[in-house]
Image: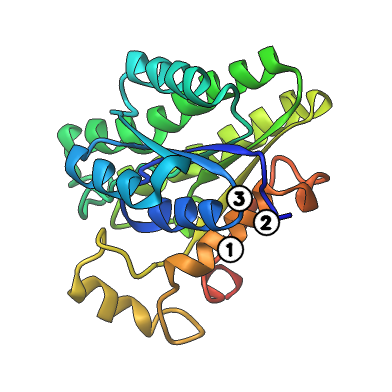
């Protein structure tokens, strides 16, 4: 048997970057996957490539009705939800607390913070209704653990994700619903420009960026039954950045 046989996973932001890598990893390990993404073209392409084990649901994670539809569609198609990865996110561009704009703040927090709240809320509600537990993995950031002074909207949102994870992980621990967060360093994804990637390579003690496959491996572990005594944890995968 594969590690995630008979599991059903929902991955927001699943059409690219870390979300796509996590979805691919899940498929390879026997799970059925729902790709939730705002990009219809990419989402449909990914689901088609994955075949019968995947579907695509267009989702704006900042819209409550979209999240409700996502959960309902998943259950209608596959009968249950075992795993949810809240991976949808944006960077928002630079801005310290004085020079950032309300437009930046509202846009980033809507997706990176409120989107995680809504995804957790309705995923956990479904898992409670099922009564069989489950695993929620939130994608935070190393900047949820330490500050990014030049990007207050992003670091604020990701810090919020870390605390949502703690709160939800403790609240539903006795129901067998585990909520953990992954806190990546700068990862080689389309979200980061070539200039940003070059700048950050030297800032990680390992002297390189992380890969989406490395992050997906950690997500897979947290989703699996091998991590059943873990909840409320936020785990850095950052090449040593937050250890210095």
Q: Name the quarter where the C terminus is drawn.
A: bottom right
* Residue visible at 34% across and 13% down in the picture: 65
In the image, residue 93 lies at what x, y percent? 20, 53
Q: Name the quarter where the N terminus is drawn.
A: bottom right
Image mark count: 3
What secondary structure is marked by label 3? Answer: loop
- Tag in front: 3 or 2: 3
Per the image, the residue denoted by label 3 is 30
Which mark is first along the chain, 1 or 3? 3
In the image, residue 25 lies at what x, y percent? 52, 58
* Residue visible at 34% across and 76% down in the picture: 200
Q: Which mark is residue 206?
A: none
In the image, residue 202 lies at what x, y percent? 38, 85
Which mark is first along the chain, 2 or 3? 3
Find the residue positioned furthest to the front.
52
Per the image, the residue denoted by label 2 is 221
In the image, residue 209 lies at what x, y percent? 40, 77
């Amino acid at each position: 048997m594969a590690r995630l046989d008979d599991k059903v996973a929902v991955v927001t932001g699943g059409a690219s970057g870390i979300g796509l890598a996590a979805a691919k990893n899940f498929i390879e390990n026997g799970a059925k996957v729902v790709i939730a993404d705002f990009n219809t073209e990419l989402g449909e392409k990914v689901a088609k490539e994955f075949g019968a084990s995947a579907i695509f649901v267009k989702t704006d994670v900042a819209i409550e009705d979209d999240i409700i539809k996502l959960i309902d569609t998943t259950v209608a198609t596959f009968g249950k939800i075992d795993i949810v990865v809240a991976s949808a996110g944006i960077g928002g561009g630079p801005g310290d607390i004085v020079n950032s704009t309300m437009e930046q703040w509202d846009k980033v927090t809507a997706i990176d913070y409120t989107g995680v709240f809504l995804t957790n809320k309705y995923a956990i509600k479904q898992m409670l209704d099922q009564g069989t537990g489950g695993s929620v993995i939130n994608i935070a950031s190393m900047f949820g653990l330490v500050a990014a002074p030049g990007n207050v909207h992003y670091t604020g949102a990701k810090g919020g994700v870390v605390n949502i994870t703690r709160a939800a992980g403790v609240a539903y621990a006795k129901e067998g619903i585990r909520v953990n967060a992954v806190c990546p360093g700068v990862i080689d994804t389309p979200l980061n420009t070539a200039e940003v990637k070059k700048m950050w390579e030297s800032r990680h003690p390992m002297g390189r960026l992380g890969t989406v496959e490395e992050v997906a491996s950690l997500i897979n572990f947290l989703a699996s039954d091998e991590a059943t005594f873990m909840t409320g944890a936020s785990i850095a995968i950052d090449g040593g950045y937050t250890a210095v």
